[in-house]
Image (tube, rainbow, N blue to C red):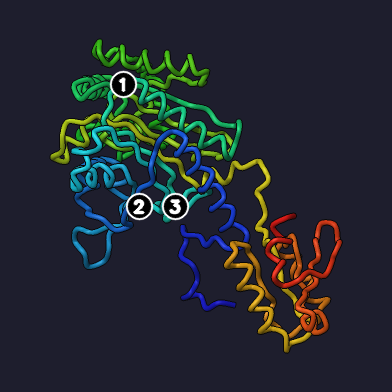
């Protein structure tokens, strides 16, 4: 047993066999969908400026207040809790707005939050997400939602629903905050201590609280969209109209705000009852002021992120198993060097293969090859080698034949 001081900390997870291959499979599928929509991949640092997230996510949010993982001894460095602020900052810092006024990017990578570990909710987790910078068109919002839906469908063709709302512009959010204060005032004693504090500093965060008492109060407020200006109301209607045209089902949830302060106008969340209390699967929205708040041009933007670990909990389709094209076995130990030479030929030709380097019987090696679901087994024997041949066995049919070494690549590729 491993010494306790070496155990993996709670809230982080190793993905070994076969989970590592499963994750890569879904990541590759997601990459393909992103490319279909014209998004290109960006790779971001895991370590970043603490002030970047404090300022732009919001001081009153759960992420900033309790979940950011700071690096010990480093006052202004942390492990990234999300990627949108990073992409917005990098877009400005690298001057990409000069050559990419329309910027469509996606990312796949680890995020970190100091949360209480729960099912599908880890301290180190993986996000699959996208950002569309440079357009305030409702078509951009609708495309982002459709894209998120298509990514989710890779894991679960059903068993999820889309909730959507509009926060309006910054002026509308001020009106909403004022309306909330008026409506919440009689119920202050029923709010949790955090929300009693948020009532003064950031009342919109109360709508995002998961405390059962607070949720009960919020649901009773009967919040509608009276705070929206005419432009924002029309924008939201246009988004819904496009989703209707695309036959994307949704439910308008007027209490949906999301947990980050930079959102404006459209916000959305995909949830699944199969995930239990932490039902959020993917979420996003529009953030029209984030780029300018970071001293960049006044470019609008919209994005989303999906939690890969949560999505994996919903998968209801078989995962392709890891398969080698060929497995090489030797009738005796003295032929291992020849096995390596054959492996080199196959690998150079782009054919995956492996060898059992242990000193074991031919029967044991053949049995071990089954772990890799190899399509072919290459058997190297002394008599065959003298003739410049090997035995090639096609595992699905159990048919085998002798082939010349110089023909082995052609024989394997031809099947």
The picture quadrant where one finds residue 343 is bottom right
Q: Which residue is mark 3?
A: 125
Please state the horizontal and vertical placement of residue 174, each as a whole percent of the image.
Answer: 20, 24
Q: Which element type, helix, strand or loop, lies under badge 2?
A: loop
Give the mark nearer the N terminus: 3 vs 1: 3
The kind of secondary structure element at disc 3 is strand
The Cα atoms of the two marked residues, 3 and 1, are separated by 32 Å
The residue where tag 1 is placed is 137
Query: Decide: marks 1, 2 in contact (CB < 8 A)?
Result: no
- Disc 2: which residue: 43
Q: Name the spot of residue 270 as percent of width and height, x first.
A: 48, 32
Label 2, label 3: how many angstroms apart (C-alpha)? 16 Å
The answer for how far apart the CA atoms under marks 1 and 2 are is 27 Å
At a point 48% along the width and 15% down the height, the residue shown is 244
Above or below, comparing residue 345 to residue 157 in the picture: below
Question: Which mark sits nearer the N-terminus, 2 or 3?
Answer: 2
Q: Which one is in front in this view, the residue at disc 3 or the one at disc 1?
A: 1
Decide which of 119, 410 is in the foreground and name it: 410
Of callouts 1 and 2, which one flags the residue occurring earlier in the amino acid sequence? 2
């Amino acid at each position: 047993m491993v010494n306790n001081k070496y155990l993996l900390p709670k809230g982080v997870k190793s993905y070994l066999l076969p989970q590592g291959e499963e994750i890569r499979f879904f990541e590759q599928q997601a990459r393909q969908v992103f490319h279909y929509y014209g998004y290109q991949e960006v790779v971001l640092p895991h370590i970043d400026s603490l002030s970047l997230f404090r300022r732009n996510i919001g001081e009153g949010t759960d992420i900033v207040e309790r979940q950011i993982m700071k690096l010990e001894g480093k006052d202004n460095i942390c492990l990234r809790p999300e990627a949108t602020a990073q992409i917005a900052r990098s877009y400005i810092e690298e001057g990409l707005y000069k050559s990419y006024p329309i910027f469509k990017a996606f990312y796949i990578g680890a995020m970190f939050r100091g949360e209480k570990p729960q099912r599908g909710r880890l301290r180190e987790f993986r996000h699959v997400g996208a950002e569309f910078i440079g357009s305030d068109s409702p078509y951009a919002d609708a495309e982002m939602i459709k894209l998120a839906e298509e990514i989710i469908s890779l894991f679960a063709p059903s068993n999820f629903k889309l909730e959507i709302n509009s926060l309006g512009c910054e002026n509308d959010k001020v009106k909403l905050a004022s309306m909330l204060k008026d409506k919440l005032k009689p119920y202050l004693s029923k709010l949790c201590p955090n929300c009693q504090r948020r009532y003064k500093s950031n009342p919109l965060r109360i709508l995002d609280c998961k405390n059962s008492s607070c949720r009960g109060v919020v649901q009773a407020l009967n919040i509608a969209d009276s705070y929206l200006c005419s432009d924002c109301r029309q924008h939201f209607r246009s988004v819904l109209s496009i989703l209707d045209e695309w036959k994307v089902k949704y439910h308008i949830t007027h209490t949906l705000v999301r947990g980050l302060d930079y959102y404006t106008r459209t916000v959305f969340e995909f949830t699944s009852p199969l995930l239990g209390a932490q039902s959020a699967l993917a979420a996003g929205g529009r953030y029209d002021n984030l780029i300018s708040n970071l001293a960049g041009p006044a470019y609008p933007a919209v994005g989303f992120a999906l939690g890969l670990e949560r999505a994996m909990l919903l998968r209801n389709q078989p995962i392709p198993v890891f398969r080698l094209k060929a497995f090489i076995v030797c009738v005796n130990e003295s032929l291992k060097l020849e096995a390596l030479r054959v492996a080199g030929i196959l690998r150079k030709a782009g054919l995956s293969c492996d060898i059992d380097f242990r000193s074991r019987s031919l029967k044991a090696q053949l049995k071990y090859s089954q772990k890799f679901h190899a399509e072919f087994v290459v058997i190297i024997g002394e008599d065959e080698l003298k003739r410049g041949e090997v035995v090639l066995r096609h595992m699905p049919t159990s048919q085998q034949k002798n082939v010349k070494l110089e023909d082995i690549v052609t024989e394997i590729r031809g099947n």
